[in-house]
Image (cartoon, coloured by chain):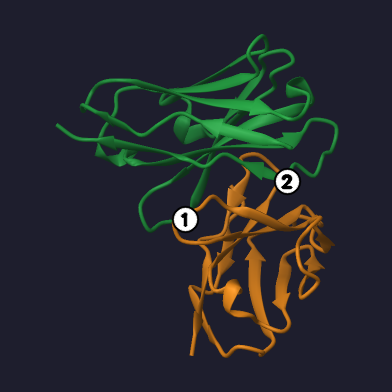
Chain colours: A green, B orange
Amino acid sequence: EVLLQQSGAELVRPGSSVKISCKASGYTFTDYYMHWVKQRPEQGLVWIGRINPANGNTVYAEKFKSKATLTADKSSNTAYMQLSSLTSEDTATYFCTRSETTDYYYYFDYWGQGVMVTVSS
Amino acid sequence: DTVLTQSPALAVSLGQRVTISCRASKSVSTYMHWYQQKSGQQPKLLIYSASNLESGVPSRFSGSGSGTDFTLTIDPVEADDIANYYCQQSNELPYTFGAGTKLELK
């Protein structure tokens, strides 16, 4: 069974950073890109970027290039996203989701349960 | 970026046929996918590559379209289908989602 298990909710101060995780199981970690998606309360989905766990290559949406840093640890089948210089605009639920690296249609077939990040003083 | 436009909301009756539309600002070929999201849950893949039903998804869901105009059809609508529906394109980076269509009961 494919599972993407994300870390717990975070309450963080403005100006700080946070690192959230997504542990994958039930499939070969390096055969799938890991993507990250942002959803602000009662709003839609926004793609942040993706990482290829096989080689660490990353692609980011322009607006997240200085906000998010994606990494992956093949030894533990875990992907990470660090968010920096946090503001209230970063208060959101963040999902990890995967797509097959060899299927160029890049649809997201499994999703993590989401991590709620709240930025507040 | 490719902008995807969806109607904000649709009111339906149970047992009815409903069509949810998604229009792309430029051609995305068939690189269009549909997701269902219920309140407090993660999105769920329904349709990939415009018209392919994801494994385990009921056959009352179907998708069609190519280029710039796409539709997700639910026939017949069941109570469990009341949710938000999002289209997503993967024709070009950055991948983008529509703003979502909220399916509501009449």
Q: How many marks?
A: 2
Q: Position of residue B66 (x, y in %)?
A: 81, 64
In the image, taking residue B40 as reference, residue B42 lies left or right, namely right
Question: Mark 1 = which residue?
Answer: A44
Q: Earlier in the sequence, mark 2 or mark 1?
A: 1
Q: Position of residue B2 (x, y in %)?
A: 62, 52
Q: Residue at x 57, y 39 (%)?
A: A112
Q: Chain of mark 1?
A: A
Q: Is residue A37 above or below residue B52?
A: above
**Viewer-proximal residue among A81 and A115:** A115
Crowding near the residue tagged with mark 2, few <14, some 14–19, many ≥20 C-alpha atoms within 10 Å: many
Mark 2 secondary-structure assignment: loop
**Whether labels 2 and 1 share one chain:** yes
In the image, taking residue A2 as reference, residue A39 lies left or right, namely left
Mark 1 secondary-structure assignment: loop
The image quadrant of residue B56 is bottom right
Q: Amino acid at mark 1?
A: Gly
Q: Residue at x 38, y 58 (%)?
A: A42
Q: Residue at x 58, y 22 (%)?
A: A79
Question: Mark 2 = which residue?
Answer: A107
